Structure formats: C-alpha cells, structure tokens
C-alpha cells in the first residue's frame, strides 16, 4: 500500500474549495451560514468575534442544527442586519 503524500498544494486546494463554498453561501439569500461565514460576511477574520456580536439584542437569532450541534444563521437576516447598521452609521 502506498502512502498518501500531502503537499502545500493540498492545503491550498482545500482552502480554495472552502472559499468557493463560502462565496456561494454568502450570495444565496436562503443559505444557512456557519459562524465562520457570518464572521467573513461581517468582515471579521475569526469566528471568535461572533460572541461579541451575539450580545446585540437586534442581531438575528440562530437556528440550532441538531445533527451538527451547531448554530446557523439565515444569510438574508444577517445581511439585512448589517445593512441596517450601515445606514445607522452612514445616513447618506
């Protein structure tokens, strides 16, 4: 049996595939976003920023996905929330 050899290209390929999936999800209004995708949509580098955002009572409520034990957010609701904040801080 041969060994599988992983290279830097394997990592880069996986990153590119994940980025492509993120782009599709972030542009699909009915998509259910992961915390990482919410962070990306909001311009944060890390999903560790999400707990700060969740403290805002106006932020959309998550949907609990039982099978994966993760919360997901509706893309449309998150984008609407971002747009409302943008208008709040930039009334032009």
Image: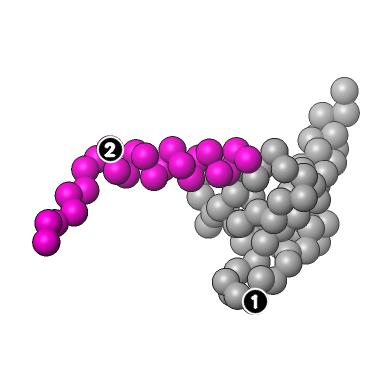
Image quarter where the C terminus lies is: top right
Taking the spot 57% from the left edge, 71% from the top edge, the residue there is 68
Q: Main secondary structure of the magenta part?
A: helix
Q: Is residue 14 above or below residue 73?
A: above
Q: Position of residue 13 (x, y in %)?
A: 36, 39
* Residue 42: in magenta span: no
> Gap in Å between the C-alphas at discs 1 and 2?
34 Å
* Residue 20: in magenta span: yes
> What residue is pinned by disc 2?
9
Q: Position of residue 19 (x, y in %)?
A: 50, 40
> Which stretch is magenta?
1-24
Image quarter where the N terminus lies is: bottom left
Taking the spot 57% from the left edge, 43% from the top edge, the residue there is 22
SS class, disc 1: loop
SS class, disc 2: helix
- The residue carrying pointer 1 sits among few (fewer than 14), some (14 to 19) or many (20 or more) residues within 10 Å by Cα, namely few
User: Dots 1 and 2: beta carbons under 8 Å?
Assistant: no
Taking the spot 77% from the left edge, 45% from the top edge, the residue there is 29
Q: Is residue 61 above or below residue 41?
A: below
């Amino acid at each position: 049996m041969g060994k599988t050899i992983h290279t830097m290209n394997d990592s880069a390929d996986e990153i590119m595939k994940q980025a492509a999936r993120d782009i599709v999800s972030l542009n699909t209004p009915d998509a259910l976003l992961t915390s990482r995708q919410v962070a990306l949509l909001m311009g944060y580098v890390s999903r560790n920023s999400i707990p700060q955002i969740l403290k805002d009572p106006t932020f959309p409520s998550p949907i609990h996905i039982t099978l994966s034990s993760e919360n997901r957010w509706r893309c449309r609701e998150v984008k609407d929330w971002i747009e409302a904040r943008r208008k709040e801080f930039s009334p032009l």
